Image (cartoon, helix red, strand yellow):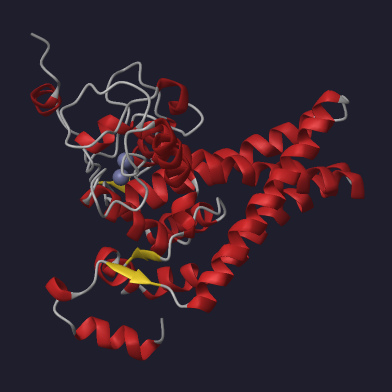
Amino acid sequence: MTNSSEKQLTSIPISVKPTMIAASDSIRAIKRRFILSLCSISLLGLGVAIYQIFSLEVTRLSVIIFLVMYILCGLGITVGFHRYFAHRTFKTTRFIEICLAILGSMSAQGSVVAWVSVHRCHHQYSDLEGDPHSPHLKGEGIKERWQGLWHSHLGWLLDDKLPNSMIFAKDLIQDSIIVQINRLYIFWIVLGVLIPSVLEGILTWSWYGAFQGFIWGGIARLFFSFHGGYTINSIAHLFGQRPFVSKDQSRNNFWLALPTLGEGWHNNHHAFPNSARFGLQWWQIDLGYGLIWILKRCGLIWEVKVPNIGMIEAKLVKVS
Ligand SMILES: [Zn+2]
Ligand SMILES: [Zn+2]
């Protein structure tokens, strides 16, 4: 969108601003090429990584770098993009805010402004007409359910219309530093691939080490960073338990909770979207909240919102 059309849109009263904006043909073509390239490159990385596992070529260092990169980028999404930027469930320093925005961008799930716009729109229209990535809007037949699953996981990324950031992420657009980070989205993705490559290259002092870092911490890790987040849009609105009363189809999925660093407790999250803590029971592992807890102890995060026991019990589904 050009600056002049942005100014025009700002001057329109919010009630009449369109909630969805159609991209121009050229932007749509660029977006499709980008998503296709991202899927192909990350799939290639996954293929090489699997080959190396079976041919016993993988080193312990490569696996460690993969895990560190995956966890850091995942924390950027769940703690940064989701719990901080989209829901403002705590307050933090400018430095932490910038780190979270950059790490989240390295997951390649969208730039921070686009991610927050889509996500806030998802909460506003959860599983109803207007939800950008609900798996429940294609129909009830078997074919329609598969179409819904595809749409909620990847298909929605190719949609012509996306949520209007001027409505859903106005606070972020007014923040010049966040806008700068948002503009450099592709740069952060490339940096997220180069860092593990350079790191493993230096640690092993070899070009082969650099190649291993590129594959494991870079493009194979991108596959999991990219798809890991989207499993919440698809799987966590289809399979799992619904302990809380909510108007949508969100579910708590135990199997997704650990790899998504707490995002798998999605029914909890829809019941308490302003809570920094997604795992509301002691046994519900929530690594994202673990980081928030540690940073709070260090004085780097404050005013952390968490529901009390009374609020949790009031929303639980009553079994008669
Ligand atoms: Zn949801
Ligand atoms: Zn949310």
Residue 91 visible from this viewpoint: no
Residue at x 77% of width, y 44% of height: 215
Residue at x 78% of width, y 28% of height: 60
* Percent position of residue 297, x then y: 35, 37
Depth check: give the residue in front, 255 or 137. 137
Quadrant of the rendered image holding ligand 1: top left
Q: Choose top left, top right, bottom left or bottom right for residue 8.
A: bottom left
Q: Considering the image in quadrants, where does the N terminus appear?
A: bottom left
Q: Height in image: 8 above or below 96?
A: below
Relative to 25, is 60 on the left or the right?
right
Q: Choose top left, top right, bottom left or bottom right for residue 170.
A: bottom left
* Percent position of residue 99, x then y: 49, 56
Relative to 23, is 271 on the left or the right?
left
Q: Residue furthest top?
A: 320
Residue at x 63% of width, y 43% of height: 223
Relative to 152, is 140 on the left or the right?
left
Q: Residue furthest bottom?
A: 4
Q: Considering the image in quadrants, where does the C terminus appear?
A: top left
Residue at x 69% of width, y 53% of height: 193
Q: Height in image: 244 above or below 231?
A: above
